[in-house]
Image (spheres, rainbow, N blue to C red):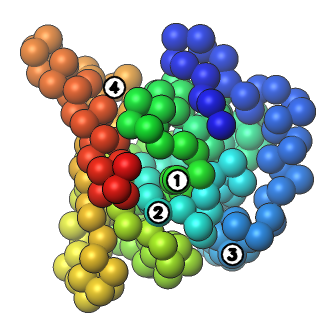
Amino acid sequence: MTCISVSAMAYRMGETTFRLAQEADIYAPHVESINRYVDELRRSERGWAPYVAPLHGGANARVLSILRDPGPATQEDTGSGMLCIENDDPSAALQCTLLEHAGLVASDLTPWNAYPWYINRSPKTAELEAGLPTIVRMIGLMPDMRVVLLQGGDAQRSWKMLKRQHRGIIADRQLVAVPTYHPSRQALFTPDPIEQKRREARRFEAFQEAAEALGR
């Protein structure tokens, strides 16, 4: 599958045929266990959570990508209702470009969030704590997972918390954690142009490291 570049500013979830095909396959075999779990999360008191688009590898993916929280483009009424690199969102489009640059495809990766319920703000510490069991569950649902891509400070904080509480799981699975910056524009906000370039470069480096960990 070929991603659309960021510069094109066009995203396939905006195409009705593509979006409906993704919706029709929400419970396809490779994503069924994950999206049934999302159904469980939606019934919790914390509210609504988006599905993982079947474009991604689901339970078969070898990379778990963790961001902060679901963005507006994942909403059902105004967006796709799914976590997907083809959402109508610049952060999603950048991830598409980063995957291509590293020689990876959408099915290599399954997207998730440190706090998987929709809040559209930075999670509080207690909310990151609440999200930890969902990451543990995702690890259990993805038997071939090798890499955890930690995109942004909240994802990295969450992983540090998880390591303290579930160190055995990480050690047993020999998971490789790759930290990087969040793909949003805000992650580059700095008055220092050299630092901005460094952050931009780190995004590409991180996806390349993930690819190398997979033997690509």
Percent position of residue 204, x then y: 30, 32
Nearest the camera: 134 or 119?
134
- Measure the alpha-carbon separation of dots 4 and 3: 33 Å
N-terminal of the two: label 4 or label 3?
A: 3
- Measure the alpha-carbon separation of dots 2 and 3: 16 Å
**Label 2–label 1 contact, CB within 8 A:** yes
N-terminal of the two: label 2 or label 3?
A: 3
Task: Say what secondary structure mark 2 lies in.
Answer: loop
Q: Tag 1: Cα neighbours inside 10 Å, few (<14), some, or many (≥20)?
A: some
| Three-letter amino acid code of the residue under disc 2 | Arg
Q: Is residue 201 left or right of residue 88?
A: left
The residue labelled by disc 2 is: 62
Q: Which residue corresponds to the image point at 61% horizontal and 58% vertical from the top-left?
A: 57
Q: Is residue 125 above or below residue 93?
A: below
The residue labelled by disc 1 is: 108
Percent position of residue 104, x then y: 47, 43
Q: In the image, which is nearer the foreground, mark 2 or mark 3?
A: 2
The answer to whether residue 119 is seen in the rendering is no
- Measure the alpha-carbon separation of dots 1 and 3: 17 Å
| Three-letter amino acid code of the residue under disc 3 | Ser
The residue labelled by disc 4 is: 186
